[in-house]
Amino acid sequence: MSEVAAGRRVFSGGVWEERYGYARAAVAGPWVLVSGSTATIDGEVVHVGDARGQTLTAVGIALAAVEKAGATREDVVRVRFYVVDQHDFDAVGTALGETFGDVRPVYTGVRVAGLIDPRMLVEVEIDAYRGESS
């Protein structure tokens, strides 16, 4: 399912959404809350060994959900990212800076022991605020 469904949920068709019973994003009033997104396309991790490439792919997946929920890149107010290797913080931060430019959302970066697949280097969550009139 790729549209906003009843209950204001967005699904991307990712393999774990159905298996683990979650939505890619949920709309709660003016908020769009996007689940952790990784560089997984059609069930396969892409850009293996490339934190920047994985970040750009993961953010693209997350932003597609934001847009399906009726918000835009400019509505993004918070980005949380999780990296496995502390040396990847700069590559991830630079990729996020390229993506968001002058939007300047707040960021939180956390180093974690690992992600669901050992080839994954980064996971990204996004919160967007569509304003009081939404």
Image (cartoon, helix red, strand yellow):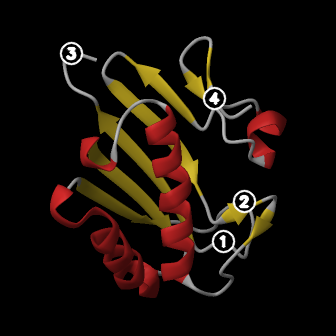
Query: Disc 4 to disc 2, how far (Cα)?
Result: 25 Å
Query: Disc 4 to disc 1, how far (Cα)?
Result: 26 Å
Q: Nearer the viewer, mark 3 or mark 2?
A: 3
Query: Is 60 positioned to the left or the right of 99 in the image?
Result: right
Res. 120 mark: 1
Q: Earlier in the sequence, mark 1 or mark 3?
A: 1
User: Amino acid type of disc 3?
Assistant: Ser
Res. 133 mark: 3
84 above or below 110?
A: below
Q: Residue 34, image x and y in percent? A: 49, 40
- Residue name at image x 40 percent, y 19 percent: 28
Dividing the picture into quadrants, the one containing residue 88 is bottom left
Res. 116 mark: 2
Q: From this viewpoint, is residue 58 visible?
A: yes
User: Amino acid type of disc 1?
Assistant: Met
Q: Nearer the viewer, mark 4 or mark 2?
A: 4
36 above or below 120?
A: above
> In the image shown, does 125 or 58 lie closer to the viewer?
58
Q: Residue 10, image x and y in percent? A: 59, 30
Instruction: Please give the residue where the numbered disc 4 appears in the rendered image.
Output: 3
